Image: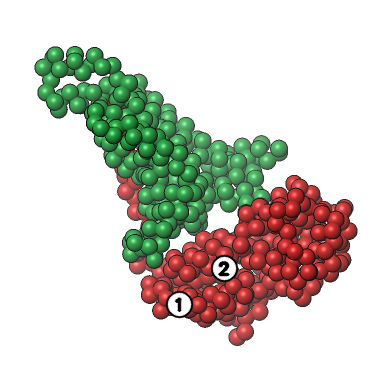
Amino acid sequence: MRRLSIALICLVLVVCLLPVSSPAQEKVLIMATTTSTDNTGLLDYLAPKFKEATGIELKWTATGTGKALKLGENCDVDILMVHAPPAEKKFVSHGFGVDRREIMYNDFVIIGPAEDQAKIKGKSIKDALQTITSKQAVFVSRGDNSGTHKKELSLWKAADVPAPDKENWYVQTGQGMLATINIAAERNGYTMTDRGTYIKYEDNLKGNPPLKILVQGDAVLLNQYSVIAINTTHCPKANYDMAKQFIEWIGGAEAQQLIKDFKLLGKPLFTPNAKM
Amino acid sequence: MDFIFEGFFEAYKLLVSGNAETYSAILATVKVSSGSIACSLLLGIPLGFCLGYFDFSGKKTLRTIVDTLMALPTVFIGLLVYAFITRRGPLGNFGLLFTLPGIGIGQTILALPIVIGLSATAVESMDQKLRITIMSMGANRRQLFLTSLWECRHGILAGAIAAYGRVMTEVGISMMVGGNIKWHTRTITTAIALETNKGQFGMGVALGLVLLAIAFCVNLSVSFLRRRY
């Protein structure tokens, strides 16, 4: 019996000592990105193709754009894929990042219950936000300093309404996009999302979700995604060569076509727009 | 409500079909939680034993501190560990961020106060007459130590199980320090958080059941050992 327990302990030890990380010589590029590129499955789809083309393994951690930029500033990653152009430009001008390249876009939409209690359907984004404020309809916000949240705040500003904060009808979730959409559905409220995540949500619910797109198409609703390499003068250990390779690859014809072909429910989630 | 039943079905499917993603998360969870529990037992049992066994000034204060640390929130530990191991932190050179050993450090910090506190309690609640009995049988100091340690093994084991449960089920540290990287640092709990965020509730339930199944196996083997000794 004693032998058995010794064997058991040995087994546990062996499991603990199993090589924890893959061999060091393997080429690994670490990326911080936003929840939308991860939740929609875009990176799951692109990473193997990138490995095929360059032999580099892409590892990513998905958070809001705010935290992703922070991880970049702290030199914890080699590359960023984010969607908050003003914050990105600031990031680059502070010397944290280089080689910012715009790679694709989709757009933001306002979604809400089909019965549309505040009657915002088809309105301009400005009118819609003003109506939501005056009718005090439930509006669910990311509230997490992500790219989507930054965009939403700028839209309140553009609509000349003080950005809500403590109001009862304004719900700040502090969570990812899909979680926020689900909360909006539970509260029967409105929210703003990128179209890619919305299509994913539609797909999750087999094409028949309770929340529908009500406001779309305004030029200000454009949602631009970019990649940024971490500046090696700020972070000497950042893996610039591989980051550069990724930037060239994702902006190249092959990867741009892959992005174009990435569809759910027959709808494209992102539109490639890298300048070649 | 449906997704709970869907979850049972899904869990069965994941385990039987040998779903690679699930097994990668299971392996990450088992590796990192066994590693950190082993470290915290190695450090914690001797410390806890000393804390319970010896009388010294400031013992009560120390006890209160240890008991307070049992309530350390996991996200807070995650943040602390992150501050040390980010590439710009004091331990940045070791490249521990987004790795399992990085998570292990955080989980060891999480488990340590539990192991120390509960071991100390186990030693304190030991029958005081035992010490006299052992000494009257002519035991030397070392034998006295070892016998006392052996006598409170059940209490210490209970502490170890409680700590293991806490380590295996935490999300904050794994998310903050590990980054939930697929195939590498995605543990079962961060996978549950992700699937729930993605609205895949059935999958979340399934992974929760898988975690429970692992906990069941661990407790089963522990109770087996306990019956033997």
Colour used to depict chain B in the structure image: green
Q: In percent of the image, x 64 and y 43: which residue is there?
A: B202
Look at mark 1 in the image and give the residue it sits on.
Answer: A231
Q: In this rendering, do the residues under marks 1 and 2 share a single chain?
A: yes
Q: Amino acid at mark 2?
A: Leu
Where is residue A125 shown, x and y percent of the image?
Answer: 80, 68
Where is residue A141 shown, x and y percent of the image?
Answer: 70, 57
In the displayed structure image, the side of residue B208 where residue A105 appears, left or right: right
| Between B32 and B9, the one nearer to me in the picture | B32
Q: Secondary structure at mark 2?
A: helix
What's the mark number on residue B145?
Answer: none
- Please identify the quadrant where the C terminus of chain A is shown: bottom right
In the image as oriented, which residue stretches furthest toward the bottom? A276
Where is residue B21 shown, x and y percent of the image?
Answer: 52, 51
Look at mark 2 in the image and give the residue it sits on.
Answer: A46
| Between A236 and B9, the one nearer to me in the picture | A236
- Please identify the quadrant where the N terminus of chain A is shown: top left
In the image as oriented, which residue stretches furthest toward the front? B57
Query: Can residue B72 be seen?
Result: yes
Crowd around label 1: few <14 · some 14–19 · many ≥20 (10 Å): many
Using the rendered view, name the quadrant where residue A123 is placed.
bottom right
Q: In percent of the image, x 68 and y 54: which residue is there?
A: A172
Where is residue A253 shown, x and y percent of the image?
Answer: 60, 81
Q: Amino acid at mark 1?
A: Asn
Image height of A9 relative to B220, above or below: below
Query: Can residue B116 be seen?
Result: no
Q: The numbered mark 2 sits on a residue in which chain? A: A
User: Which of the two labelled residues, at mark 1 and mark 2, occupies the earlier sequence position?
Assistant: 2
Crowd around label 2: few <14 · some 14–19 · many ≥20 (10 Å): some
Colour used to depict chain A in the structure image: red
